[in-house]
Amino acid sequence: MEATVMMSIILVFVLGSIEFLFVFYQWNAATKAVQVGARLAAVSDPVASGLNVLSVAVESPSLAPGDAMPIFEIRCNGATMSCECTGACVGVSGYDAKAMNTIIFGRGSSSCTDAKSFYSAGMCDIFTRIKPENVTIAYVQTGLGYVDRPGGPVPTVTVALQNLPLQFFFLSGLLGLKNISIPPLTTSITGEDLSTTAPM
């Protein structure tokens, strides 16, 4: 009887330790995936259609070439496939699913785990459970760039995860652990050309 009680305790402890390591792996992989996504978003076509030509679109009698870019903040949500803009949003026309897929799946890919190199890897090449609906991207003007800049504005790009649950294999049955989401991990980086091709 004592052996039965002790074996049960030891089994829960061993399985719990394995589960903890697997949860730690998921957290670490998700963190790295967000970092890769932010880097890719900074040098790819923006998910907010028209953002890469915003610096030309805002040129007006009151804003001449070389003037400071006006303030804007654009938030794109993969779950709703929409972008919301506040501030100077001239020419920003909506959500670009192809641009989001580039960030999720990588350059020239439409699936996970097929990246030939780190250069072409997307978020789901790092953590295969990430899908477009798990990602939000924010483009926020922070004072860099200028009106009529050939490469477009220079916003701070923030990539974040949302609604991505942790997977439990042993403890979900033993202790009922499920539906625990990975916290909204975020990574911010300064945008560059916001284009997959060099500006003309």
Image: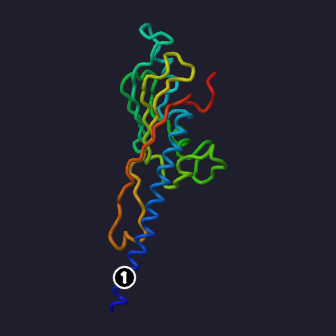
Q: Residue at x 41, y 19 (%)?
A: 70
Tag 1 secondary structure: helix
Q: Residue at x 61, y 24 (%)?
A: 199
The x, y position of residue 179, in whole percent, is 35, 60
Check the image and name the residue furthest to the right: 116
Name the image quarter holding residue 150.
Answer: top right
Vertical arrangement, residue 178 with respect to residue 33, above or below: below
Type of amino acid under label 1 = Ser
In the visual, does 75 lie left or right of 54?
Answer: left
Depth order, front residue of 67/136: 67
Vertical arrangement, residue 80 with respect to residue 191, above or below: below
Instruction: For the C terminus, give its image quadrant.
Output: top right
Instruction: For the N terminus, give its image quadrant.
Output: bottom left
The x, y position of residue 116, in whole percent, is 67, 49
Q: Residues within 10 Å of mark 1 (few under 14, many from 20)?
A: few
Q: Residue at x 40, y 42 (%)?
A: 80
The x, y position of residue 44, in whole percent, is 56, 34
The x, y position of residue 164, in whole percent, is 41, 53
In the picture of the structure, the residue carrying the numbered disc 1 is 8
Depth order, front residue of 144/200: 144
Q: How many marks?
A: 1
Vertical arrangement, residue 104 with respect to residue 167, above or below: above
Check the image and name the residue furthest to the top: 61
What colour-coding does the image apply?
A: rainbow
In the visual, does 150 lie left or right of 158?
Answer: right
In the visual, does 68 lie left or right of 180?
Answer: right
